Image (cartoon, rainbow, N blue to C red):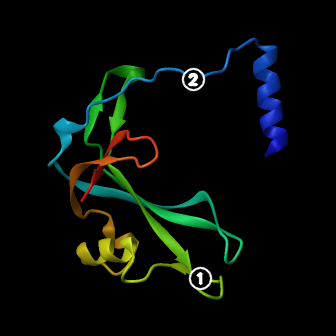
């Protein structure tokens, strides 16, 4: 990864592209709170974190809804969806990835009355605001 980062940095220097913090547009997600929408996809996502006990990457389930709204038009249109991440855990052997009933993932699956994540597709959820612990930004999640 270091070589790729060095190549990118060198390419940007050669192209004389300044790099720094910029202001990004924000979206007020409050108008979408309470909207009922169906889950469209469930994928496994490798996170940037490592399970120190087993020296293996940590994974999460990324659960995404159908499009809640389309903002803008044409090539600049943004399709707004709600999404949540649910952590997965390695078993003691480090061979199997999953969840336990008492975890955030297990509790969500139980609430949705499904046995495995694939059964979530098509189930209805209610949009709500989630606040990032990292930077305080709000995004559209669901309950």
Report the front residue among 114 and 93. Answer: 93
Please name the residue that numbered disc 2 is placed on.
Answer: 21
Residue at (35, 27) in percent of width and height: 26
Report the front residue among 133 and 95. Answer: 133
Category of crowding for the residue at label 1, using alpha-carbon neighbours closer than 10 angstroms: few (below 14), some (14–19), many (at least 20): few
Give the number of the mark in front: 1 or 2.
2
In the displayed structure image, the side of residue 66 where residue 20 appears, left or right: right
In the displayed structure image, the side of residue 49 where residue 103 appears, left or right: left
x then y, percent, for residue 30: 20, 37
**Vertical placement of residue 4 versus 100, above or below:** above
Asked where in the image residue 80 lies, by quadrant, the reply is top left
Residue at (45, 79) in percent of width and height: 99
Mark carried by residue 66: none
Report the front residue among 123 and 32. Answer: 32
Residue at (50, 71) in percent of width and height: 88
Q: Quadrant of the C terminus?
A: bottom left
Distance (Cα) linking label 1 and label 2:
40 Å
In the displayed structure image, the side of residue 31 where residue 76 appears, left or right: right
x then y, percent, for residue 72: 31, 22
In the displayed structure image, the side of residue 2 where residue 65 appears, left or right: left
**Vertical placement of residue 80 versus 142, above or below:** above
**Vertical placement of residue 85 versus 79, above or below:** below
**Vertical placement of residue 89 versus 136, above or below:** below
x then y, percent, for residue 22: 53, 20
Q: Secondary structure at mark 2?
A: loop
x then y, percent, for residue 50: 65, 65
Category of crowding for the residue at label 2, using alpha-carbon neighbours closer than 10 angstroms: few (below 14), some (14–19), many (at least 20): few
Nearer-N-terminus badge (1/2): 2
Asked where in the image residue 41 lies, by quadrant, the reply is bottom left
Please name the residue that numbered disc 1 is placed on.
Answer: 96
């Amino acid at each position: 990864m270091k070589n790729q980062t060095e190549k990118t940095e060198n390419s940007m220097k050669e192209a004389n592209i300044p790099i720094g913090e910029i202001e990004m547009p924000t979206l007020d997600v409050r108008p979408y709170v309470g909207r009922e929408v169906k889950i469209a996809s469930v994928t496994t996502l490798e996170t940037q974190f490592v399970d120190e006990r087993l020296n293996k990457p940590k994974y999460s389930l990324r659960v995404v809804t159908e499009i809640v709204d389309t903002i803008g038009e044409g090539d600049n249109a943004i399709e707004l969806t709600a999404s949540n991440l649910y952590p997965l855990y390695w078993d003691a052997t480090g061979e199997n990835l999953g969840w336990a009933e008492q975890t955030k993932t297990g509790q969500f699956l139980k609430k949705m009355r499904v046995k495995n994540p694939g059964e979530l597709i098509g189930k209805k959820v209610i949009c709500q605001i989630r606040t990032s612990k990292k930077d305080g930004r709000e995004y559209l999640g669901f309950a």
